[in-house]
Each structure stands twice: as C-alpha cells, then as structure tokens.
C-alpha cells in the first residue's frame, strides 16, 4: 500500500471515539498537524489486539502537532511541539491548514 499523504502535508486526525483498543491518543483526535515522516507500513495493531490478522499493512506516519494546537494556552512555549505516530486510517486531509 502506498502512502496517501506526503511529507510536509497538513492532515487532521479523525475525531473518532470507537470502543476498544485503539492506538491513537485521545488528545490528538480532531487536531491538525504536519506529516514529518512516513515510518513504513505495518499490520494494524488495533486488529491484532483482538487476535484478528490485521493482514492489510497500513502506512504509519509521524505527525508533528504544535503545542498550541493541542493545548491552546496550556502550551508552555509557542514553539513547543509533539510528534505522534499515527496509522493512515486515522488521518484525513486538513481543510484550510493548521488552526
């Protein structure tokens, strides 16, 4: 499977809250970040956690979020950022960029 998103592309994490084992942190859901790297393709750990095969390999992205995007006034410095590994099925194109 080829990567849907390119380096430097602005993406939004789906604001989904499915029950069960998921690998996307709650605090990035619905937030916008920038693709820093494509880390490769991996079997879906959300499927593997339930003993299902997860045979379909999914691209894994390293997405950088600004601290302001995640915590608004709670960010210590405007230049702070967090990088999170996120599987492709959690990402969608961002409309209008960051913010």
Image: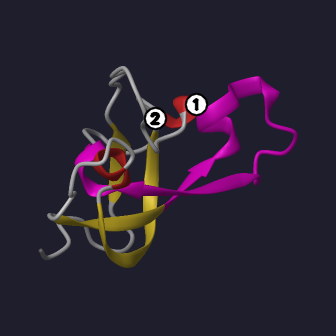
State the image coordinates of residue 82 (x, y, percent, origin top left).
66, 53
Between 77 and 59, the residue placed more toward the observer is: 59
SS at badge 2: loop
**Which quarter shows the N terminus?**
bottom left
- Read off the magenta span: 63-92
- 38 magenta-colored: no
Question: Residue 53, relative to residue 94: is it above or below?
Answer: below
Question: Residue 46, relative to residue 30: is it above or below?
Answer: below
Question: What residue sits 67% from the left and 37% below the top?
Answer: 68
The answer to which image quadrant residue 72 occupies is top right
Mark 2 nearby-residue class (10 Å; few <14, some 14–19, many ≥20): some
Question: What residue sits 39% from the left and 46% below the top?
Answer: 49
Mark 1 nearby-residue class (10 Å; few <14, some 14–19, many ≥20): few
Is 94 situated left or right of 22 in this image? left
Residue labelled with disc 2:
31
Label at residue 27: 1
Furthest toward the right, the residue is: 76
How far apart are labels 2 and 1 at the CA level? 8 Å
State the image coordinates of residue 55 (x, y, percent, origin top left).
16, 64
**Res 91 seen here:** no
């Amino acid at each position: 499977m080829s990567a849907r998103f390119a380096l430097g592309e602005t993406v939004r994490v789906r604001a989904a809250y499915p029950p069960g084992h998921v690998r996307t942190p709650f605090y990035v859901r619905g937030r916008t970040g920038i693709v820093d790297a494509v880390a490769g393709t991996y079997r879906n750990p959300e499927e593997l956690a339930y003993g299902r095969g997860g045979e379909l390999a999914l691209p894994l992205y390293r997405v950088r979020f600004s601290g302001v995007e995640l915590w608004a006034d709670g960010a210590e410095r405007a230049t702070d950022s967090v990088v999170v590994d996120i599987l492709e099925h959690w990402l969608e194109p961002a409309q209008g960029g960051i913010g």
